[in-house]
Amino acid sequence: MKMPEGAIRKKRDAGRPRKFAEPSRPITVTLPTRVLRMLQELSPDRARAIARATETAVGAAKEREPMRVEVVEVAPGIGLIIVGPSESLHRIPWLRLAEIAPGRYILTIVPGTAIEIVEVAISDILEDREDMGQSERAMITEILKWIRSLRRAQNITKAELLLVSTRGRRGSRPVDIAGT
């Protein structure tokens, strides 16, 4: 028995219309009410608002030249090394990249870690990671050059940051500030 034309609906025609012209999937997120109000200003549709905010934040970071290494003066004669994102640096267990702005990170190390150990670990990454992209390799090479030359000139030191526990704060998850 032949069905009348148009009686069979294709799978892609069933259900809700697509929001995006590219592959997508549903997710569930919990966001602060303040952020939800901000997203509402971008679009009444939360999915579109999240997509727009993400594309704006990440797109702006990617449109900049590939992040190398920057030294930002934080006090007279004292600079802070700022780096771009790096999957390879994340592999060093006692080194953390703390994001200070989209795509911009400061390097933090576990207390007691010697500068020489940092230098050796970064050198090892360059030596061992053959699958590293050219941009990331250039950035890590630049980090190594900075650290090595500053160490040799005895112009590098470690300083302490004030880190606070977020345990017990409403809406926050416990944070292991020691990195253990």
Image (cartoon, grey):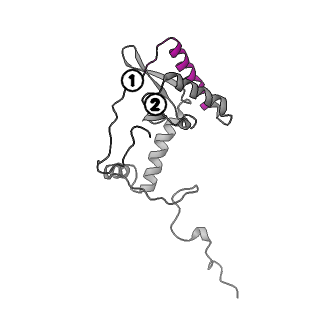
Number of dots carrying numbers: 2
Outermost residue toward the right in this view: 1
Question: Does the image show residue 166?
Answer: yes
Q: Quadrant of residue 148?
A: top right
Magenta highlight range: 135-157
- Residue that label 1 marks: 159
Left or right position of 133 against 70: right
The amino acid beneath tag 2 is: Ile
For the point 44% across and 35% down, the residue is 98
Residue 171 painted magenta = no
Image spot of residue 124 (x, y percent): 62, 29
User: Would you call the spot at circle 1 few (<14 residues within 10 Å), some (14-19), or many (20 or more)?
Assistant: few
Up the image or down, 117 lies above or below 97; here it is above
Left or right position of 57 against 165: right
For the point 47% across and 34% down, the residue is 97
Image spot of residue 81 (x, y percent): 47, 24
- The numbered mark at residue 109 is 2
Residue 137 painted magenta = yes
Up the image or down, 118 lies above or below 7; here it is above
